[in-house]
């Protein structure tokens, strides 16, 4: 959405900060995902609920026909309540509780993505007690790096996620001996905010190596889940508002060595919802420091923690001003030095009361909000033309 296209007149009188969701953009994004994934038979897309679990966002995505990728029992329950059919829900996470597992068994979800041998044994035991057979995929740690922030890289041997690929053969044989689990396939995920398709090519190559080895050992492979990770353009949200799903799906179609009829699962999150969300705030004060000028907002790290957590960039725009640009450190009101949205940002001259838009916060904005400093949680506004 272009700066001038925000319905700023409707913001007046509304308490800030709040999350503003462009539902038309979300709908166009979902249509693009279905178009590009639909070119390849056997491609199945599950939305990563952790990116944004707002009930209205979930409802729209469920109605579009995507499945759900969950990492907690709470997310499984939220996905089910929003209308995702249980047979489209996949459940990952290194620390599933007994209650989480029992919920998945009771609902009849598509599968558990198992992240350790210890978890596998617990699922088998709980499924036996419940008189059920649990569908499982093995999450494999492929020891593949991604060109992204270290804190959102998940596929290296040092990361806590998955079973190391060299241990896969022994774990798979154990799965096949269990009476109360049913092996469905292999699950991979190497990280988030990936823009270089070469990282996904490297994943495909490792998947091909692993599946070839299993076949040589006469072991089943099942279907393949390649996780998510596709990034967005945070620098230019007005002109590049939909992620490059065409290249993303084409990369896997071209480089994965699949058998006839083999299904491939994808778990995008950020690329689905990040562009449609904007954090709307007001300028509380313009403060001229000794060496810097500050725009102090009524939104802070309690509404968007990514800059403080990852030093992440989000485009900042002054919706109220068309004056010449000046340099500001754009900061929040939280009693922490890290409560900074950006330093030395060039934005239109700020005044007290100006509406400030912090862009591309549809993912990992609202869902990571907190009440630190006893601040109230921000409301959500859903905009449709």
Image: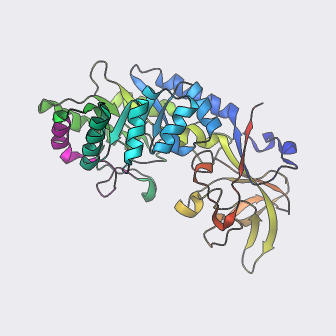
Q: Is residue 65 left or right of residue 100?
A: right
Magenta segment includes 55:
no
Q: How far from the left and from the top, in percent, is residue 112?
A: 35, 37
**Up-down relation of residue 9 to residue 136 (above or below):** below
Tell me residue 239's x, y (percent): 66, 39
Residue farthest to the bottom, as pictured: 290
- The percent position of residue 37, horizontal first and vertical second, equals 47, 25
The residue lying toward the viewer, choosing from 220 and 9, is: 220
Outermost residue, left direction?
217
- Compared to residue 35, the image places residue 309 above or below, namely below
Res. 24 in view? yes
Residue 302 location, quadrant: bottom right
Identified at 37% across, 43% down, the residue is: 189
Q: Is residue 31 left or right of residue 112?
A: right
Check if residue 169 falls in the magenta segment: yes
Q: Residue, x 44% and y 44% (percent of image)?
A: 71
Question: Residue at image x 28%, y 18%?
Answer: 260
């Amino acid at each position: 959405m272009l700066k001038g296209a925000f319905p700023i007149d409707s913001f007046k009188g509304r308490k800030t900060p709040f999350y503003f969701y462009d539902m038309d953009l979300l709908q166009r994004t979902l249509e693009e995902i279905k178009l590009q994934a639909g070119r390849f038979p056997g491609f199945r897309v599950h939305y990563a609920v952790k990116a944004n679990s707002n009930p209205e966002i979930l409802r729209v995505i469920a109605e579009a026909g995507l499945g759900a990728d969950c990492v907690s029992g709470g997310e499984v329950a939220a996905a089910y309540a929003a209308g995702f059919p249980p047979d489209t829900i996949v459940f990952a996470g290194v620390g599933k509780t007994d209650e989480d597992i029992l919920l998945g068994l009771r609902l009849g979800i598509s599968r558990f993505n198992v992240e350790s041998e210890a978890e596998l044994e617990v699922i088998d035991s709980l499924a036996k007690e419940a008189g059920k057979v649990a569908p499982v995929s093995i999450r494999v740690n492929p020891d593949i790096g991604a060109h992204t922030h270290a804190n959102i890289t998940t596929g290296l041997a040092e990361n806590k996620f998955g079973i190391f690929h060299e241990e896969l053969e022994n774990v798979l044989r154990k799965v096949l001996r269990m009476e109360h689990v049913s092996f469905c396939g292999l699950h991979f995920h190497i990280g988030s905010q990936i823009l270089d398709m070469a990282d996904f090519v490297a994943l495909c190559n490792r998947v091909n190596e692993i599946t070839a080895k299993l076949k040589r050992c006469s072991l089943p492979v099942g279907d393949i889940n390649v996780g998510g990770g596709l990034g967005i353009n945070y620098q230019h949200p007005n002109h590049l508002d939909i992620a490059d799903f065409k290249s993303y799906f084409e990369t896997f179609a071209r480089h994965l060595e699949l058998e006839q009829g083999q299904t491939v699962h994808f778990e995008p999150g950020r690329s689905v919802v990040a562009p449609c969300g904007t954090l709307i705030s007001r300028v509380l004060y313009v403060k001229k420091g000794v060496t810097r000028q500050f725009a102090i907002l009524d939104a802070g790290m309690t509404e968007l923690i990514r800059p403080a957590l990852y030093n992440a960039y989000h485009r900042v725009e002054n919706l109220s001003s068309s004056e010449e640009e000046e340099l500001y450190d754009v900061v929040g009101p939280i009693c922490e030095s890290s409560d900074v949205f950006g330093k030395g940002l060039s934005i239109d001259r700020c005044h007290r009361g100006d509406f400030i838009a912090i862009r591309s916060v549809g993912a990992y904005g609202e869902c990571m909000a907190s009440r630190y400093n006893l601040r109230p949680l921000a409301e959500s506004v859903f905009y449709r033309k």
